Amino acid sequence: MRPKTMSTRLARTLLASSLTLASAFSTAVVLAQQPANPPQTSQPQRPANQMKPEETEQWEPVPKVVTPGKMNSDAPSDAVVLFDGKSLDQWVNVKDKSPAGWTVANGVITVNKQTGNIETKRSFKNYQLHLEFQIPANITGTGQGRGNSGLFLASTGPGDDGYEMQIMDSYENKTYVNGQAASIYKQSPPLANAARKPGEWQAYDVVWTAPTFNADGSMKTPAYVTAFHNGVLVQNHFELKGQTLYIGHPSYSKAFDGAPIKLQAHGDKSEPISFRNIWIREL
Ligand code: MG
């Protein structure tokens, strides 16, 4: 009898184990079939003719109050002013982090090509940025050698490391289109050429969504940019393929969490360009 009892127990144990396994397996299958983020619809939606208007009103949280500037180009109340026409206190030379060596006179910054690129002391992640620039009226040169500078939406290292939105003279000046003014350099031509004549002030308004990275340094979510050049949409939620490179294909090779904003002192021989009224709102 004893062996039979043991075999019965064994059979019961095996049956119980297989049931547990089967239930675990079916749970796993159900979990695998569910989307990662199931929609928050615990109750079935009713048709509109059975609803009241109040049921789709949202009252909280109340958006913060931001006082806009007099003109849309003026800094709103919550902006960090990066250049107010007086000093380069917010900026340093990229190469050695010494005080920015570009020229400030008559309320504007003019590039000093000898001292090289400058960048903000502060780092930023996601933001809205306003910047104005002027190609000098006496500009000379052709193609990329005519008023070339650059707005690096994130500076990730020395020199031209980072993510550049091109600044140059694109008023009746032919070059490769993914390198003209308001392009994401060598990744995305602007949707339109909204360049003004040399001597006139121009504006970029940019919305930057920074890339994010996994713990192992691989890209988790890409960078996006939306931008206006003189009020004209030039980049519409463009998904960047990585850092902007002069040579080679872009990739997200360097992880970072917040980065300075950089302005380029391009090595061409044309007359240096100027900047004014630069502000940023962190998002
Ligand atoms: Mg450039």
Image: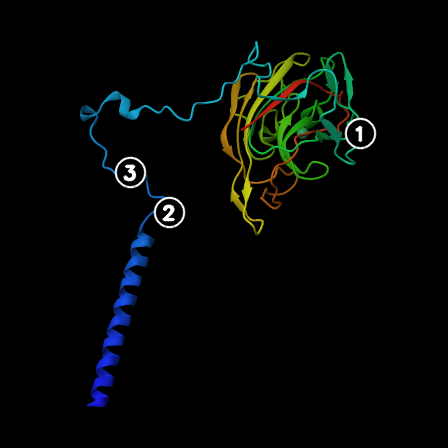
Q: Amino acid at mark 3?
A: Thr
Q: Secondary structure at mark 1?
A: loop
Seen from the viewer's position, the closer of residues 225 and 23 is: 23
Quarter of image, res 245: top right
- Disc 3 target residue: 41
Q: Is mark 3 within 8 Å of ligand 1?
A: no
Quarter of image, res 188: top right
> Eyeballing the image, is 207 above or below 195?
below
Mark 3 vs mark 1: which is more N-terminal?
A: 3
- Disc 2 target residue: 36
| Protein image colouring | rainbow
Label 1 environment density (alpha carbons within 10 Å; few <14, some 14–19, many ≥20): some
Q: Residue at x 74, y 16 (%)?
A: 86
Mark 3 vs mark 2: which is more N-terminal?
A: 2
Mark 2 vs mark 1: which is more N-terminal?
A: 2
- Disc 1 target residue: 115
Residue 29 in percent (x, y) is at 30, 57
Q: Residue at x 73, y 13 (%)?
A: 107
Q: Amino acid at mark 2?
A: Ala
Residue 64 in percent (x, y) is at 49, 22
Residue 5 in percent (x, y) is at 21, 85
Q: Is mark 1 within 8 Å of ligand 1?
A: no
